Amino acid sequence: MSLRRRRVAVAFRLATVVSVLAGIGLTALGPATVTGLLPYFTIQSNVAVGLLAGYAGRRAWRGLPEPPSALKGAVTLYITITGVVYHLVLANPASPFAMPQPDRALGEALGNQFLHTVVPLLAVADWALFDQRGRLRVRHAAWWLAFPLAYLGFALVRGLVVHRYPYPFIDAGQLGYAGVSVSAVFFAFAFWLLGLLFVGVDRGLSRRVARSVDAPAVTVAAPRPAADDAPEDAAAGQQ
């Protein structure tokens, strides 16, 4: 990575860390406390993005290689899930799992957008612009499901204790465990397809980079005198 590119990466990642902190801090201005926010996948994925962005920014500043592509791909997938599920499922009135959107104060509303929109966009852009290409494999899409499945188990066990569930599609009190199982299978399949999309984009960008590197250099030949000028040059030489 060139010095200029490293500087851009550092600035990009600093903006990501600031956005994560702003999102969590502003959201905590509402009725939920920071500890009350921690059980949400949104917060956990944002914290993961912030930690990875800080780590990757430090490595870029020191001229070290990027973090492992599989790790960065996983974190990028999780924050993408946060953004997609929020906008298409939770905040979408047409969704069967739409959650009522309360009237938020300005600060809390900004925090909500940081967590669900700004940080996911920054993370995906960072992955597309600065990650090392061609290192993701199809099997990674399946491995990346480990954390969402572990989160599901955590949410269900926690629900047994506190009788509350963070999201309506895993609310065993309303759906029953059979209904939660159906939701879990559907979302797991969707997340797997999203992971495959990341792998496919990585391969496409890898081929594009390879073509740009392998493209032959274009040389410009010096202009040659026209054939009609040759007699005149010869005659000039004889005078």
Image (tube, grey):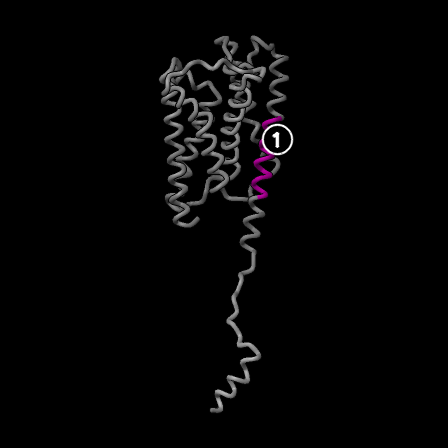
Residue 203 located within the stretch drawn in magenta: yes
Q: Is 113 rendered above or below residue 208?
A: above
**Majority secondary structure of magenta residues:** helix
**Which residue is painted at 61% across and 12% down in the image?**
177
Q: Is residue 183 magenta?
A: no
Which quadrant of the view contains residue 38? top left
Q: Residue beneath label 1, please?
A: 193
Specify start and end residues of the magenta stretch as a single range: 190-204
| Residue 92 pos. (x, y %) | 54, 19
- The residue nearer to you, when weighing 69 against 86, is 86
Q: Quadrant of residue 181?
A: top right
Q: Secondary structure at mark 1?
A: helix
Which one is nearer the viewer's eye here, 73 or 23?
23
> Which residue is depicted at the point 39% across and 49% down?
3
Image location (x, y in percent) of residue 155: 52, 16
In the image, what residue type sits under mark 1? Leu
